[in-house]
Image (cartoon, rainbow, N blue to C red):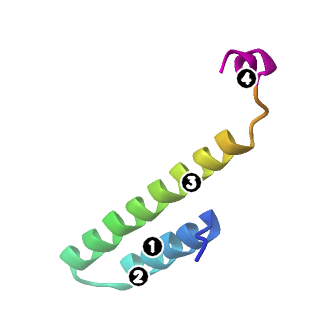
């Protein structure tokens, strides 16, 4: 299964909705931590995809 940033962002949105819906402080905090973790994973994946798709410097390739 290939995971996309859309998947991570959707899970983050789910956690944000759940955090707003709950009345228990500890549960709200858990959902907020989960939301932050999902957003961090999406950010890392977007960064990695950007590096993977970035044009490479031809001079750097010759040195390898």
Q: Residue at x 68, y 15 (%)?
A: 63
- State the residue position of label 4: 61
Where residue 52 appears, x then y in whole percent? 68, 44
Q: Nearer the viewer, mark 3 or mark 4?
A: 4
Depth check, front residue: 33 or 22? 33
Q: Secondary structure at mark 3?
A: helix
* Quadrant of the frame with the C terminus: top right
The mark that comes first in sequence, 3 or 2, is 2
- Depicted 21 relative to depicted 30: above or below: below
Numbered circles on residues, count:
4
Residue 16, label in figure:
1
Asked if marks 4 and 2 touch (Cβ < 8 Å), the reply is no
SS for dot 2: helix
Location of the N terminus by quadrant is bottom right
Q: Is residue 58 left or right of residue 25?
A: right
Check contact, mark 1 vs mark 2: CB within 8 A: yes
Q: Quadrant of residue 35?
A: bottom left
Q: CA distance from mark 3 to mark 4?
A: 24 Å
Q: What SS does tag 1 mark?
A: helix
CB contact under 8 Å: marks 3 and 4: no
Distance, label 3 to label 1, CA atoms, is 20 Å
């Amino acid at each position: 299964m290939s995971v996309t940033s859309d998947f991570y962002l959707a899970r983050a949105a789910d956690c944000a909705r759940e955090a707003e819906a709950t009345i228990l402080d500890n549960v709200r905090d858990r959902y907020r931590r989960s939301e932050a973790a999902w957003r961090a994973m999406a950010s890392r994946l977007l960064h990695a995809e950007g590096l993977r798709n970035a044009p490479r410097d031809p001079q750097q390739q010759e040195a390898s």
